[in-house]
Image: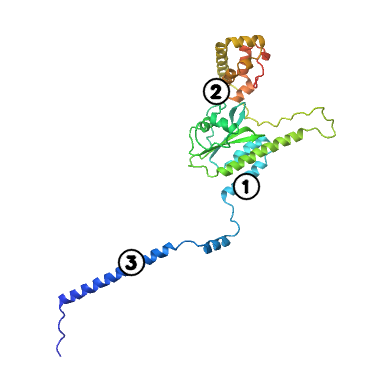
Amino acid sequence: MSDPRPVDKSQNDALQTHLEAWLNQQNQTLLEEVMATWQGALARFHPDETLLSGLRDAAGPSGPSGPADTHLASALDLVEGATSQSDLLKRLLDALSPLVERSALFVLKQGLASLYAHRGFPSEAPLKTGAVVPPPELEALIQGLSRSLRRRGPGYAALLSPISTFEAADVAVFPLRHKKKAVALLLVDSGLRQKLDHPEQIRALVLATSAMLASLAAGKEEDSRPHPAEPQPSAPTQVVPEPIESAAPVDLDPRTRAAAERLARVLVGDVELYFPAKVAQARTQGNLYGLLRDELERSRATFVERFGEGVEIQHRIFTTTIIHQLCDGNVSKLGAAPWA
């Protein structure tokens, strides 16, 4: 039996090429059909109502409270435990610590904002003493024309200036009110972060603190009322709510006192220099404050900005200088100055 005929190599290569071309074409067609089917399925791949309903049922009526809710609950408990208005303000700053990076409270007196206490700022703050003169946007907040200040600008910069030179990216200023009157300002900001994480929780805490201010003042009034068994006064007596206590002023060293007295003399001397007729009228008729109210208030604000409201309240350097230089030492000639 003879061997089979040898295969022609060129013919074998031609058959292989033809078969590979057919396989490639079939694979390409199949791949296109698979991709079309896959894309069509993706268009229908989204949660339907049946899935959402099942997820809601599995989750139950409510989930566990988040960290912010837990912090707010603890903060409200802390604020509610205050026994006085000064204790309340300190508790407010402590309660805010888990919610904000930095916070500061300013007490409002005679139209000026004095730093009361702060959290999160450098320990050496304040950087400078003295009260802050509110710019127009802060004045609008104090007068109740706005509920909060949520932007950087003159108002934020004015409050920040006594305690830090670094401005945060996100800020908020809220008023604390008693009987519809702003008695303090709360400044909070994001510190090194980009935004305040819980502005609504902060606002809720401020509202709760304002309510506690009213509650503590009402309790003070209740305690001051006479016992029913005691004889009642013939006319109702007005009860003044407990004032918000300012931080105790620092005793003056001789060098500081000398500088304060020198500035007071310069400021009062300018008033006498530029308004000699009104000063002379006040020396004979009295009522210096009524005649020169705006000028005296501006001069006093300059003095307080340099040395602080507490220094003037305790030592009365500016007031004493006015009485000595412009009223011939007679306090009755000053008139009804609110700070006299």
Do callouts 2 and 3 mark residues in contact (Cβ within 8 Å)? no
- What is the secondary structure assignment of the residue under circle 3? helix
Tell me, for residue 308, which label it has, or none.
Answer: none
Q: Answer with left or right where residue 263 lies relative to residue 330.
A: left
Q: Give the residue at mark 2.
A: 306
Residue 4 drawn above or below residue 10: below
Q: Quadrant of residue 255?
A: top right
Measuring 58% from the left and 19% from the top, which residue is drawn there? 294
Residues at marks 2 and 1, CA–CA distance in whole angstroms:
41 Å
Measuring 50% from the left and 42% from the top, which residue is drawn there? 195
Quadrant in which the C terminus appears: top right
Please report whichever mark, 2 or 3, sits nearer to the chain's N-terminal start. Answer: 3
Q: Residues within 10 Å of mark 1 (few under 14, many from 20)?
A: some
Do callouts 2 and 1 mark residues in contact (Cβ within 8 Å)? no
Tell me, for residue 32, which label it has, or none.
Answer: 3
Measuring 57% from the left and 49% from the top, which residue is drawn there? 67
Tell me, for residue 73, which label it has, or none.
Answer: 1
- Picture coordinates of residue 251, whole percent (x, y): 61, 24
- Picture coordinates of residue 173, whole percent (x, y): 56, 36
Q: Answer with left or right where residue 137 lies relative to residue 14.
A: right
- Please, what is the three-letter code of the amino acid marked with disc 2? Arg
Quadrant in which the N terminus appears: bottom left
